[in-house]
Image: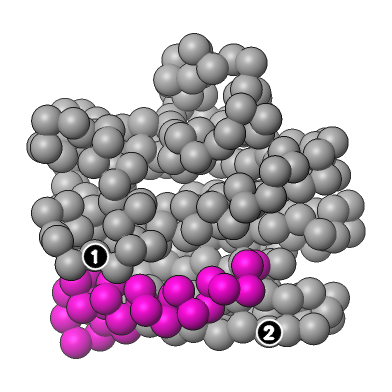
Amino acid sequence: MLSYRHAFHAGNHADVLKHFLLVQLIDHLCRKEAPFWVIDSHAGAGLYALDTGYATQLAEHADGIGRLWSRDDLPASLAEYVGLVRGLNPDGKLRAYPGSPWIAFQLLRPQDRLRLFELHGSDSPLLMQNFRAAAKRVTISESDGFAGLRALLPPPPRRALILIDPAYEDKEDYRHVLHALDDGLKRFATGSFAVWYPQLQSLKSRQLPEKLKAQMEASAKPWLHVSLTVRSPAADGFGMHGSGMFLVNPPWTLHDTLLEVMPYLVRVLGQDGGAGYALEQGKT
């Protein structure tokens, strides 16, 4: 069963963290002339309206990108991400928000390619429509992203960023993520992998970062883990109070960038005294 629609949550605090990091990772790949791929396991619709439809029901963007939208004190690396969102809203009003595929496509060079997977029967046609003019550089598959990764890795250019970001609506996604990362690194040991996860009060959510760290320590791969908590967990145990990104083979400069940006995000996006961040890394 697939009922999750990212449109309800577009532009929230979790998107801010994920998409800011996505920009940093792609920028790093662009520093070399050689082509690369960006592979997104759960691409969603690619673009989202914030002033109509699903996004208006929860308006989560108000406490995410909405808090950064008009600020003039953004750290330079964060300003690049916010600038992409502003470019999608040229009249200066926050009406639309880009998903990971749209952000990635804006940063790719002519020699680079985008490979997208989306299984949801409603989001997949929207994704195809949003990229109908870019068919030569973007390949979209209405299929399971976990299975799709096995078929694509290693990619022909031998350089790629693999974003693994399921909704975790299916509790088996936690197991699928661990398997996909393990299998992906066996097929493509030098690839850059980015795993997004929600901070929930469920045991599986709380255990995932530690399991990912143990997995990487066993494989002796360099990794970086960053999480952003925006509020204290709800008393009723429901809801997402933060999110995290676990990166394998990350740029060596990213840790210092995050030391600058994460306190800023806590200050601007934090909703109560429970707000904070964690940053850790492992090296070979």
**Residue positioned 76% across, 47% down in the render:** 159
Instruction: Give the side of residue 206 with respect to residue 41, left or right.
Output: left
Is residue 234 visible in the rendered structure shown here? Answer: no
Q: Secondary structure at mark 1?
A: loop
Q: Is residue 261 visible?
A: yes
- Mark 2: give few (<14), some (14-19) or many (20+) Cα within 10 Å: some
In the depicted structure, whether residue 67 falls above or below residue 102: below
The residue mark sitting in front, 2 or 1, is 1
User: Which x, y percent locates residue 233?
Assistant: 29, 78
Residue 118 shown left or right of residue 211 in the figure: left
Residue type at tag 2: Gly
Residue placed most toward the observer, 157 or 192: 157
Left or right side of 203 for 34: right
Q: Position of residue 279 (x, y in %)?
A: 49, 83
Within 10 Å of disc 1 (Cα), the crowding (few <14, some 14-19, many 20+) is some
Residue 137 image offset from top left, x and y in percent: 62, 22
Q: Is residue 142 above or below residue 114?
A: above
C-alpha distance separating marks 2 and 1: 28 Å
Q: Position of residue 147 (x, y in %)?
A: 76, 40
SS at badge 2: strand
Write the residue at 53% across / 78% down.
255
Residue 74 bears which disc, if any? 1
**Mark on residue 282?**
2
The three-letter code of the residue at mark 1 reads Leu
Q: Is residue 195 left or right of residue 105?
A: right
